[in-house]
Image (cartoon, rainbow, N blue to C red):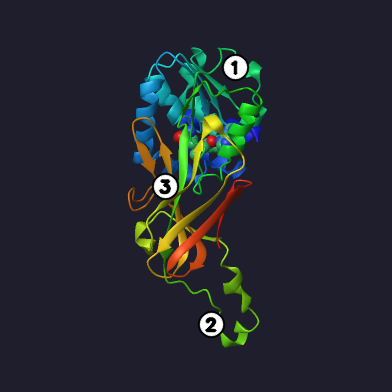
Amino acid sequence: MDLALAVLEKYLQTKNPAALVKFWQLYPKPVPSWHLTMMNDQPRNQFYEKEIISKCEGKIILDVGCGSGLLTQYALEAGAKHVYSIEQDPVLQTCFKHAFKKEIEEGRVTLIAKPSQELIQDDLKAGAPEVVIHEIFGFALFNEGVIETFTDLFKRNLIHPSMEFIPQKFSLWAALHNQPFESKIKDPKYSDQFWFLEDISHYGIPMNQTNDQTQLGVDVSSGIELHSIDLKSLSDKIEAENELTATTAGNMLRVWFKLIGEHSTLSTDLKENPGNHWGNNKYFLKFEAGKVLIKSAYKDRRFLPYVR
Ligand SMILES: C[S@@+](CC[C@H](N)C(=O)[O-])C[C@H]1O[C@@H](n2cnc3c(N)ncnc32)[C@H](O)[C@@H]1O
């Protein structure tokens, strides 16, 4: 592992392709593929740039899950006094060290190369953070552990509600949706044996994730906010019941999320923000026309909707 990272560092310094090939041989888990689509998601980047530029001048910043460092770069451009950047992925740590070599040497940036769960007060030698910037949102909002990460940092007094958070609020949205989908086993040889699959699938099975709006079916209700999270009053008990009205019967719940900033809101709804790298999730969820009660609960990085 150390050797692989040393070879990667060599490649970054020399741009010698042989070193890159050697790195791949030594370490078959290079930069995660989503990192590139994420770095090229312009609406995402513009949302963060605007929020960070307006709040970070002269401030001490904590960048939780800094990756290769785009948000750290925005904070530096804003004139931040100091940036602590935490990252758990060893390849991204190496990329970050290379990209911010000068700022690290000058003492403007500290890379904290470990998971935030291992952060201790002693790591924050340049003073307490004043602004916490973060983008640890997975394609299903919660699946990168944003709730657990912040619950832990608050519990251990490493961050406080008096600090600024970018973003401080985010929310999960859904609409009843219909898209032709074969849920029955059509082969008569097996339909008796597997008769139960469609019945038990009524309870919010995650179907798929898509970034392509042309792969969506039709919404048969308006969108509704299922859960609204405020980091300053974080609770790990996230449950809700919401009623939607379906204009026709349907078979899915389409789910997206919003990051709420002071200057703008970033929505991952593919109908508003086509091609965004998070995309939308569809859950198999059969319902009839009329009122549909959606219950949903959060547990272990997963959001679980079901119909009653
Ligand atoms: C979605 S990426 C965002 C990267 C970067 N902040 C950006 O916006 O371009 C999230 C990064 O956070 C890291 N991460 C997630 N949870 C973390 C944690 N608890 N501690 C440290 N790093 C974490 C992941 O390894 C990943 O590189």
Sequence-earlier tag: 1 or 2: 1
Question: What label does residue 132 carry, if any?
Answer: none
Q: Where residue 131 sits in the image (x, y, percent)?
A: 48, 22
Left or right? Give the position of 158 relative to 207.
right
Residue name at image x 62 percent, y 18 percent = 123
Residue position marked by numbered label 2 in the rendering? 186
Local crowd size for mark 3, using a 10 Å CA cut-off: few (<14), some (14–19), many (≥20): many
Left or right? Give the position of 219 relative to 238.
left
Sequence-earlier tag: 3 or 1: 1
Q: Nearer the viewer, residue 155 or 28?
A: 155
Task: Report, in whole angstroms, how far the alpha carbon at label 1 lies from the one at label 2.
Answer: 61 Å
Local crowd size for mark 2, using a 10 Å CA cut-off: few (<14), some (14–19), many (≥20): few
Residue name at image x 65 percent, y 36 percent = 1
Q: Where residue 47 sits in the image (x, y, percent)?
A: 36, 34
The type of residue carrying mark 3 is: His
Sequence-earlier tag: 3 or 2: 2
Residue name at image x 56 percent, y 12 percent = 127
Name above or below for residue 257 compared with residue 108: below
Question: What is the secondary structure assignment of the residue under circle 3?
Answer: loop
Marks 1 and 2 in Cβ contact (< 8 Å): no
Residue position marked by numbered label 1 in the rendering? 124
Residue position marked by numbered label 3 in the rendering? 277
Left or right? Give the position of 215 relative to 239.
left
Question: What is the secondary structure assignment of the residue under circle 2?
Answer: loop
Closer mark to the observer between disc 3 and disc 2 = 2
Marks 3 and 1 in Cβ contact (< 8 Å): no
Q: Is mark 1 within 8 Å of ligand 1?
A: no
Left or right? Give the position of 275 relative to 84.
left
The type of residue carrying mark 1 is: Leu
The type of residue carrying mark 2 is: Lys
Q: Where residue 45 sits in the image (x, y, percent)?
A: 37, 35
Q: Nearer the viewer, residue 90 or 171?
A: 171
